[in-house]
Image (cartoon, rainbow, N blue to C red):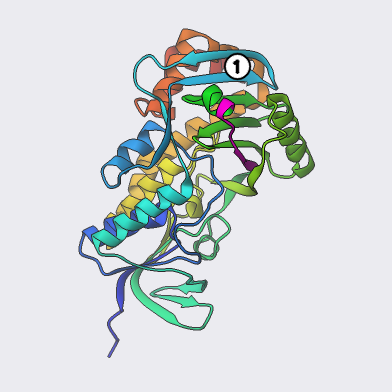
Amino acid sequence: MIAEPAWDVAIVGGGPSGLSAARAAAATGARTIVLERAEHPRYKTCGGGLIGTSLAYAEKHIDVPARDKISALTFTRDGRNEFTRHAASSPFLTLVRRDEFDHAWYSAAVTAGAVVRQNAQVRAVDQGVVTLTDGEQISARTIIGADGSAGITARYVGVGFEQQDLGLEVELAATEADRATWRGRVLLDWGPFPGSYGWVFPKEDELTVGVIMAKGHGAETKQYLADFRQRLGLNDRPVIRDSGHLTRCRRPDAPLRRGQVAVVGDAAGLLEPWTREGISYALRSGGWAGRHWQDLSQYERQVTTELAPEMAAGRRMLDAFSRYPRVVHTAMATPLGWRAFESFCQGNLSMAHVIERPSIRALLTLFRA
């Protein structure tokens, strides 16, 4: 006689994708457990920018712990050619600290009925069982991997990645002058290497300053961050945290599941390739997998239908940006370019719809010539 699994759904990882999955699964009545290797609230390297798509999803389930709402965006190209654009109406970006944001999702998952085990390190997964490092085995009908692109669930499912980037970031203590300068405004700097960019995100008493570029250029990435801080006059600010992370975008043909083991968010390589925005992908994919835990083919169909076209559009934008950063920078200064970018940030247009706008499509066609 086969023993009944202890759980309907076991989720590996307690970030936004895992906790979104947990909340959704528990809401269906599933016996749900989350296995988190750290302990909430915990710091996570992340810019913490919520575009409208993320905000709309999150506000249905949590009180979003916003640190700033952004209505102005300053663009530079390797520190030059500066201009600032303002939102026509509502803010286009909400900034959060990831420890606070993730903890809000932790509370939502627990309120929905999920059990979250902290300090639970997973050693292996297989069909129907998760093995912890101390040898304990957790049995479940469905396993959802949300432990990042370098985690064990991605390896088990066989996710392949076609784009890997290194992000470096520092959290700086903001002075009163910094708060006044940056409140309600972010900076995007198109970097000196193809596809790279830097950012400044204000979060009240902290400034998040970071850069990202293709993996394999570690020294150049560090130098870009150092130069970026120096140009901004932020070298003397105390460093609260200094961290780095890899982002990985999945190949279009990469699997999303193996049997009753599915991967979501970063573990599935789901993020927008140009901006490397991943929170909206994490929340949506996690929620879909949790809702469809009994039939994961429905989860696969939603990713293929809704997220894959956005990622394909992002790849086209990254290619254009990598080849012609000056043209992209100039385009952002035009009313059409800015409105398209603003609409994307506000969640009114997906990246797939952005590139179908006649002016943007004409530019991309020109870039391919």
Query: Along the horizontal axis of the image, is 125 left or right of 350?
Result: right
Residue 259 sits in quarter:
bottom left
Q: Residue furthest front?
A: 176
Location of residue 258 with respect to 232 vertically, above or below: below
User: SS of the residue at dot 1?
Assistant: helix
Q: Which residues are magenta?
A: 166-177
Q: Residue at x 34, y 48 (%)?
A: 301
Q: In the image, residue 237 lies at what x, y percent?
A: 67, 36
Dot 1 corresponds to which residue?
A: 329
Residue 356 picture quarter: top left
**The N terminus is located in which quarter?**
bottom left
**Residue 166 appears in the rendering:** no
| 355 over 248 or under it: above or below | above
List x then y, in percent, for residue 137. 43, 81
In the rendered image, residue 172 lying in the magenta stretch gets the answer yes
Q: Whole-percent x and y of residue 261?
A: 41, 65
Q: How many numbered markers are drawn?
A: 1
Q: Quadrant of residue 328?
A: top right
- Quick check: 66 above or below 157? above
Residue 26 visible in the current orientation: yes
Please give the name of the residue rendered at 29% of the width and 86% of the height, measured from the top-left corner.
3
Residue pictured at 37% horizontal, 78% vertical? 139
Q: Position of residue 120 (x, y in %)?
A: 47, 72
Three-letter code, disc 1: His
- Quadrant assignment for the C terminus: top right
Circle 1 packing at 10 Å, graded few (<14), some (14-19), many (20+), is many
Query: Which one is in front, 178 or 164?
Result: 178
